[in-house]
Image: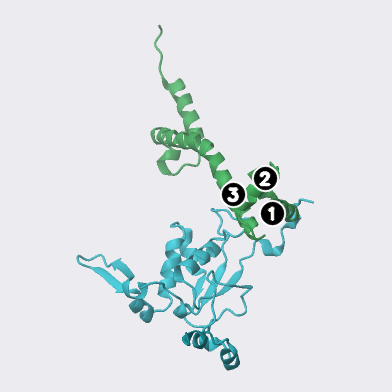
Chain colours: A cyan, B green
Amino acid sequence: MASKLSHSIGTHTRLWYLIDARHQVVGRLASMVALLLQGKNKPIYHPSVDTGDHVVVINTGHAVLTGSKWDKKLYRHHTGYPGGLKEIVAKQLHQKNPTMILRRAVNGMLPKNLQRKHRMRRLHLYPDSAHSHALNITHQLPGPCPVFKTLSDYSSEEITSFPDIVTRISHL
Amino acid sequence: VPRVKRGVTKHARHKKILKAAKGYQASSGRNYKWAKEALMHAWSHAYRHRRQRKGDFRRLWIIRIGAACRQHDTNYSQFMHGLTAAGIEIDRKMLADMAVRDPAAFERLVALAKTD
């Protein structure tokens, strides 16, 4: 039965999402975060009302840039003075402040209107896993990129019991 | 023709314009010349936006339907394709309304769209 009472208290609240950025590609993660900040995942979305949620991203210091972007991607700004074009490589920017790359990515992916500033204020980035919003978090979301296990994630029994493919071929 | 002084008719014409411009900022809400200018822009915007309104709403409904579909493991394009394949002709306005007010029925539609 259709009725207005199908709205619950949770329909219009601002949720708090927690996302781990470890091994997540910056651009793909930023795209997902920008959608959450705008509230475009909600059927009650309207552009004039800020239906966005809070997003807490941890481990931004361990996010991934593919290719040779760490050495080649330039972040530029102009100071306003003649000859004042400042360029900084992604690697150096990351060393200076490990949250800046993701912050700039999300900022660029939000619509450029008056709501952008408010939405960016709802983005909370932390370079490591420590964050101060444990009481607020409502959901934890997986990042857009699948996380694979590295060699150090396997136990020594699993490593030794793995079938020995290389030595079997080497006798040929 | 007897001599006519233009005051009364002019006043009536101006009063009509100023009434239509009530609430406009600064001179545009008080001064006949500026009010007329502001109203010409307003009427031109209203004409254009009455036609744009149809597209604007359709775009909003599509965003809302897409958001609701993604909560049910599909996306807007797959959902609409499934609906047309199932012969369901419910329009986007009603689908978007159902997504908010009658989520159970919307979920049934998603299930119908997913069946081959």
For label 2, the residue is B85
Q: Residue at x 61, y 66 (%)?
A: A14
* Disc 2/disc 3 C-alpha distance (Å): 18 Å
In the rendering, at what x and y percent does residue A107 appear? Answer: 44, 65
Q: Which mark is residue A86?
A: none
Nearer the observer, B96 or B42: B96
In the rendering, at what x and y percent does residue A66 appear? Answer: 41, 72
SS assignment at label 2: helix
The chain letter under disc 3 is: B
Residue B64 visible in the picture: no
User: Dot 2, crowdedness within 10 Å: few (<14), some or many (≥20)?
Assistant: some
**Residue type at numbered disc 2:** Ala
* Disc 3/disc 1 C-alpha distance (Å): 18 Å
* Side of A54 where A60 appears, left or right: left
Nearer the observer, B100 or B14: B100
Disc nearer the start of the sequence (2/3)? 3
* Side of B45 where B58 appears, left or right: right
| Label 2 close to label 3 by CB (< 8 Å) | no
In the rendering, at what x and y percent does residue A135 appear? Answer: 62, 79
Disc nearer the start of the sequence (3/1)? 3
SS assignment at label 3: helix
The chain letter under disc 1 is: B
For label 3, the residue is B62
Q: Which mark is residue B114?
A: 1
* Disc 2/disc 1 C-alpha distance (Å): 10 Å
**Residue type at numbered disc 1:** Lys
SS assignment at label 1: helix
The chain letter under disc 2 is: B
Q: Nearer the viewer, mark 2 or mark 3?
A: 2
User: Dot 1, crowdedness within 10 Å: few (<14), some or many (≥20)?
Assistant: some
**Residue type at numbered disc 3:** Ile
